[in-house]
Image (cartoon, rainbow, N blue to C red):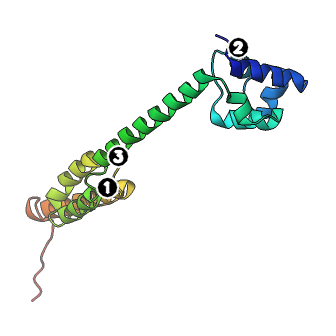
Amino acid sequence: MINSLSVKLKEARLNHGYSQNEVSTILHISRQSISKWENGRTYPDIDNLLMLSDLYEISLDDLMKSDESIKANYANNNQEIIDKRRTQTRVNDELYQNSNEGLMLVVLSLVSAIVPPIGVILPIYVMWRNTKYNSLYKMIYLISIVVMLVSLWGTWIIISDNLLPSHTEVYRIN
């Protein structure tokens, strides 16, 4: 499937006295890519076409003129890019539909610290609910861990004061 672009690329390279290896070194791409372009198996992307045009001192118009297959390929690629951007926008909207979720999780974690036994359990739920799409992603983990540690300490104080026997001795002075 040799097309006019591949023939023009090969002719331009030979006219300038370059080997495929030299062109690949100049463009910082593989030699196999040059070979595929010149054999008509693939097309160079627009950036590489621009660099080839500069290297071979040929205008893009001259390179692509009368090659309908490459024009159709670029038209299809442009439509595919537009479709993917639409899909990406929709996905981003779904991910960020509740942009205040991070703030709500921080508040929930901090409020749970008021009652120590709840402050041990609720931050676990907050960390489970947290996602990397939250604006305060790392801060939520940090706050939840601190609240859990403080709540564990508070819960230990409550248990030791109310449920464990006291070891305090009271002396009466006469």
Q: Which mark is residue 174?
A: none
Q: Which mark is residue 39?
A: 2
Q: Residue at x 37, y 59 (%)?
A: 139
> Image point 81% across, 27% down: which residue?
23
Residue 97 rendering spot, x and y as whole percentages: 26, 51
Quarter of the figure with the C terminus: bottom left
Q: What is the secondary structure assignment of the residue under circle 1?
A: helix
Q: Position of residue 119 (x, y in %)?
A: 19, 58
Residue 89 visible in rendering: yes
> Camera-side residue: 103 or 17?
17
Helix, strand or loop at label 3? It is helix
Q: In this rendering, is residue 54 above or below 102? A: above
Measured from the top left, where is residue 81 in percent x and y?
Answer: 47, 36
Question: On the rendered structure, is 100 left or right of 138?
Answer: left
Residue at image mark 3: 92
Q: Which residue is mark 1?
A: 145
Q: Amino acid at mark 3?
A: Asn
19, 152: nearer the viewer: 19
Q: Nearer the viewer, mark 2 or mark 3?
A: 2
Quarter location, residue 161: bottom left
Q: Is residue 29 above or below residue 40?
A: below
Distance of label 1 from label 3 (alpha carbons): 29 Å
Q: Earlier in the sequence, mark 2 or mark 1?
A: 2
Say whether residue 16 is left or right of residue 24: right
The foreground one among 42 and 171 is 42
- In this view, 170 is above or below 38: below
Q: Residue at x 11, y 59 (%)?
A: 164
User: Quick check: 51 left or right of 165?
Assistant: right
Q: Is residue 32 visible to us here?
A: no
As measured in the structure, the alpha-carbon distance from the residue carrying label 2 to the one carrying label 3 is 40 Å
